[in-house]
Amino acid sequence: RLCLRRSLGAKEAGDGGAAPGRAAAARSGGGGGGGARRGARDAEAAINRVLTFPGGWLAPPTASRAAPASVDPAAWVARAAELDQLRCRCIPDICCLLAQLLRRCGELRRCVGLADVVADDHLGLHSCFDRPELQRFLGLLRDAAAQALASGSEDPLGY
């Protein structure tokens, strides 16, 4: 989350989330115009790898995850509950921050495409959103789709 917040803060400051040396080069004209988009794509790829990693700590809890023989079953259940709380605390913020980053960097198609990732039943990310968080996330996607529609250069549904 800190990485995404830093990228968003840097984008608002005008350096597109680049490292300090790259920001100076970009301001002087030597950095090229794709730094912000490249940074947004890199952040999206990294977050997607974390969110979609099978068996990772952000993966939804499943019945197939049995406690190892060396672990107390009660402790295993408590750990699973803690991981679920952690998932539900982090995932909505991560998804919203990523949507903001992609929209601000002009990656509207990728921003709207986050809806597919969140809605995927295998990943179960949608189960981590409560009603206000889901409304906030969908509002960000709506704004990106409206921006794409207004620009006329991209499909507002991200396809």
Image (spheres, rainbow, N blue to C red):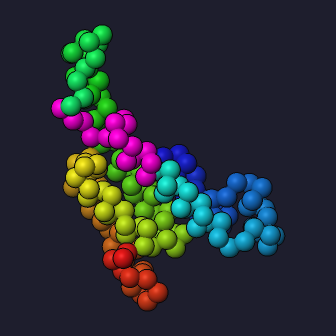
Seen in the picture, residue 34 relative to 70 is either above or below; the reply is below
Residue 110 quadrant: bottom left
Residue at image position (58%, 67%) is 37
Could you tell me which residue is drawn at 37 percent across and 67 percent down?
A: 113
Q: Which residues are magenta?
A: 48-63
Residue 97 figure quarter: bottom left
Question: 4 or 113: which is nearer to us?
Answer: 113
Image x and y of residue 65, in percent: 24, 29
Left or right of 79: which side holds 51?
A: right
For the residue pair 35 and 68, the one nearer the viewer reads as 68
Dividing the picture into quarters, in which one does residue 78 lie?
A: top left
State whether residue 143 appears in this view: no
- Which is more toward the observer, 111 or 137? 111
Is residue 51 on the magenta stretch? yes
Task: Pinpoint residue 69: horizontal percent, then vertical percent.
Answer: 26, 12
**Farthest residue, direction left:** 63
Q: Is residue 2 above or below residue 116?
A: above
Q: Is residue 35 left or right of residue 45?
A: right
Q: Measured from the top left, where is residue 111 in percent x and y?
A: 42, 67
**Left or right placement of residue 51 versus residue 133 in this view:** right
Q: Position of residue 61 (x, y in %)?
A: 24, 36
Please identify the dominant SS of the magenta region. loop
Asked if the magenta segment contains residue 143, the reply would be no
